[in-house]
Image (cartoon, helix red, strand yellow):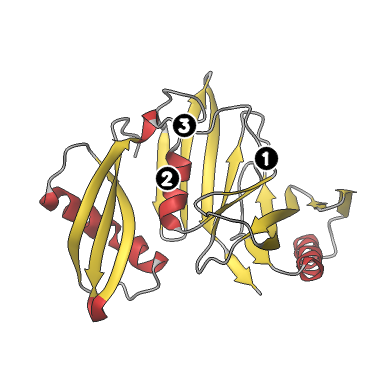
Amino acid sequence: MGDSNLVEYRIELSATFDVDITSSVLGSPGLDRAGVEELIEKDWMWISADKHILQESSWELTAFHEKEPIQSRSDAPHIGESSDAIVIGMDSIAERAWVVLVTRGATVDCPPEIYRSMGRAVFEAERWASTLSSGDVEVERPFDGRWRVGEHDVRLVEIDWMVVDAPWVGTFWDRSGNPDPEALLLQDRQDALAWVMRPPMPGLEPHAVVQEPWRVSATHLVRDEEVSSDAQLAKLVN
């Protein structure tokens, strides 16, 4: 999906057993209720998965609102703005947490894992490195918080933490294939979708967009080179 005229529709739904759902979908500008309902029907698999309700549940659209075109948002992050770990969509910071990422090249290969204990996070990162090695590939430790196993990297990233029911973690890959930020904590799929669709430079249009129940990503072309924003539903380990 590479339509440059996509806009975000914030939606409110009432599902089976009086479950209220707030989410978002992407579509062409100026859609009426029927058009938005078609988008929801198409995206219902990941909307329901994100909210932990049965895909077979019935739903009714109670409200919707068209936001400004995603490629022209004034709050979009720009190339050159960076932070190792960021929290968006939340009002305050409470504690610390640690994200374990398994990457290969400019790809997050496995669902991100969030740990509330640093010791547990280091232990699990070591286990990932050992598993990837299988005893045959050397595990390198170029610096604290990084394990290199062949073409894989296991990354340990400390982040600010807020209590989130179903957190997502976003990674931005720059033109050199480096992640910056490595781990960006997102409140839910709605925040994740909004984040990946923000252009890295003003006026850029998405070159490609991927949406799955557990992953959303967008690729932009910057001076004929790809940069990508990827967000995945994380595994939270207390």
The mark nearer the N terminus, 3 or 2, is 2
Q: In whole angstroms, how far apart are the C-alphas of marks 3 and 1? A: 17 Å
Q: In whole angstroms, how far apart are the C-alphas of marks 1 and 2? A: 18 Å
Report which residue position mark 1 lands on. Answer: 83
Residues at marks 3 and 2 touching, judged by CB atoms closer than 8 Å: no
Q: Which mark is residue 194?
A: 2
Q: Which mark is residue 199?
A: 3
Q: Residue furthest top?
A: 223
| Residue name at image x 66 percent, y 75 percent | 238
Residue type highlighted by circle 3? Pro
Q: In whole angstroms, how far apart are the C-alphas of marks 3 and 2? A: 10 Å
> Is 138 on the left-hand or right-hand side of 220?
right
Image quarter (top left, top right, bottom left or bottom right) of the N terminus: top left
The mark nearer the N terminus, 3 or 1, is 1
Callout in the foreground (3, 1):
1
The image quarter containing residue 62 is bottom left
Residue type highlighted by circle 2? Ala
| Residue name at image x 87 percent, y 55 percent | 138
The image quarter containing residue 176 is top right
Judged from the image, the secondary structure of the residue bearing numbered disc 1 is loop
Residue type highlighted by circle 1? Ser
- Mark yes or no: residue 56 visible: no
The mark nearer the N terminus, 1 or 2, is 1
Task: Judge whether 31 appears above or below 61 on screen.
Answer: above
Judged from the image, the secondary structure of the residue bearing numbered disc 2 is helix
Q: Residue furthest front?
A: 92
Judged from the image, the secondary structure of the residue bearing numbered disc 3 is loop
Task: Judge whether 48 appears above or below 187 on screen.
Answer: below
